[in-house]
Image (cartoon, rainbow, N blue to C red):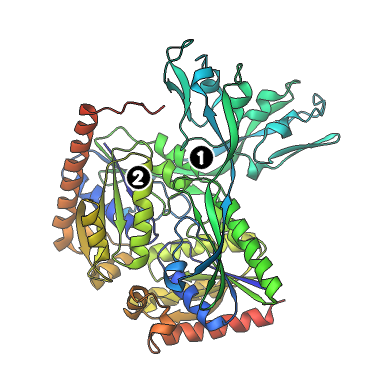
Amino acid sequence: MKELVVISGKGGTGKTSIVASFAVLAQNAVLADCDVDAADLHLVLEPRIIQQSDFSGGSRARVRSADCTGCGQCVDVCRFDALGLSGPANGDAERTAQVDPIGCEGCGVCAHVCPVDAIDFKPAINGQWYLSETRCGAMVHARLGIAEENSGKLVTLVRSEASKLAKQRGLDLVVIDGSPGVGCPVIASITGSNVVLIVSEPTLSGWHDLRRVADLTHHFGIETLVAINKWDLNEDLAKQMEAQARERGLKVVGRVRYDVAVTHAQVARKSVVEHASNGAASDIRQLWDAVAGVLQSCD
Amino acid sequence: MNIAVASGKGGTGKTTVATNVAAVSAARGQPTAYLDCDVEEPNGHLFLKPEIVRQEPVGLPIPVVDESRCNHCGRCGKICQYSAIVCIGQKVLVYPELCHACGGCMLVCPEDAISETDRPVGTLEIGHAGAIQFVHGLMNIGEAMSPPLIRAVRSNAPDVDLVVIDAPPGTSCPVIESVRGTDFVMLVTEPTPFGLHDLKLAVEMVHALDLPFGVVINRAGLGDDSTHRFCNEKNIKILAEIPDDRELAVAYSRGEMITEALPAYRALFEQLLASVLTEASAAAEQRIAQPNTISKP
């Protein structure tokens, strides 16, 4: 079983549109939407949810104001400025401690120091994850609660559930839609995967972010492919990016032209290759053939 | 005044809006700063081309165990919620990249065997681009946690009339760290199903943080009208619409400021700035008139 991860560094380069097309072309891959922060793949693949589960990435502190003496020790030890003496008065104290749930990092130090045990520290529900069926096969996806932490843990969960499913069904490929950036969710998406495809665009920002994300895949020693989306927006830059990628030992596997059909497909809730046959759709088919070739040859 | 520029979806034009709004503000003679809080993939410097005058490493305190003092009681490992320190038999292991620097282990150690040392997580760069004061952070490659570096960028904000904060995409901790406590948030979106879906998440986020906000629609004309309908239904102010113009995309690809490469669009950003300032002041006045019953810590 192999894992292909599609990432980009910069957001909005077309990862999800390409993954949706790959889902159709791969036939019988398990799909994993690891962009748990702003998941969009389901908008195209319209999954039917078979199973929904809660995700807890850690615990969270909550002061029981009736029991608080307002001593402020918790406020002093919190390194995340998540506590203040801003809670309601009780018989003992004029002002009690209160946790800002958004600032709370779930370290539990406040609950530990509280001399009267007035702080509850219990597992929090930070999101949901789903096992679904789509017209292109099974899909594992998730929704991180708004303003929640631990997207890395949720990504790891989505990935491992997708692998489990692939093994159960005897399928040999998991296609993973990653998130932008180079931080925690991206690291969780790529570590231990077989092949990473970086989808970039010919803009200075795209190029800058491609270099950083390629440094990241190099850091983890993962075979890395590059495709330039909307290449005709700035052909000179596309060429320079491809040349530099090759110099760095990355495999340049394709180009996709700028095509308004990509947006039209999205509006029609279809993948590009289902919506059109020429233009970007034909570029994505060629790109898939090249990526599938690499997947076949890697162990 | 602190104005954040955020979006759920990546690549909708946050940096274009943030840099050009900062540029028109500075051009009016207003002391202005631009902070790039997208420390994973900062791009503002590609457009503003700042002269960096100061660089400093940003570190996160991690525990160091003095083995000669440690009695292997295991309390450090028990309080740690991140599995960053574990005591196995007669050995204490520290996993620096998992540490959130809460200080819990040091606090509970009965033998005073734990001290802290800084682990580098990134670099802060401070400078200026013409009249605009510039601050950004660059996270080290392989580093997972961006919030500490984002905090460092924000705490180095110059004391000026207008601070424009360029936030990372998404709706989770790095975004929260970037927009928390700002006076107003501009949510940049594009009128496509992906853009709208992620805009809805971003709207939930600003509601959760109780921040006043408005929407900027980029690439207007592309996609469909469902974003407009959503904003109208929810009574969300559309601050500006930037048309889907190939010339804008080409200027962007070259790292050019729109206000310079395509001066015809300067008025659009001037109007956007004026509209944001009006909205933000109105929100501030409303807040004074109707203070929250429960104040935030």
Point out residue B97 in the picture as x, y percentages from the top left corner: 64, 45
In front: B14, or B155? B14
Give me the residue at 45% from left, 45% from top: A147
Looking at the image, the residue that sits furthest to the right is B90
Q: Determine which residue is flagged by label 1.
A: B148
Point out residue B232 in the picture as x, y percentages from the top left corner: 21, 56
Taking A150 as reference, is B106 left or right?
right
Looking at the image, the residue that sits furthest to the bottom is A278
Task: Give the answer, above or below, for where A264 lies relative to B270.
Answer: below
Q: Determine which residue is flagged by label 2.
A: B206
The reply to whether label 1 and label 2 mark residues of one chain is yes
Taking A203 as reference, is B22 left or right?
left
Could you tell me which secondary element the residue under label 2 belongs to? Answer: helix
Q: Is residue A20 visible?
A: yes
Of tags 1 and 2, the one toward the viewer is: 2
Q: Would you call the spot at circle 1 few (<14 residues within 10 Å), some (14-19), or many (20 or more)? A: some
Point out residue B104 in the picture as x, y percentages from the top left corner: 64, 29
Give the amino acid at mark 1.
Pro
Task: Chain letter for mark 2, please.
Answer: B
Q: Quadrant location of the N terminus of chain A?
A: bottom right
Could you tell me which secondary element the residue under label 1 belongs to? Answer: helix
Task: Chain letter for mark 1, please.
Answer: B
Give me the residue at 35% from left, 55% from top: B200
In front: A22, or B290? B290
Point out residue A18 in the picture as x, y percentages from the top left corner: 47, 75
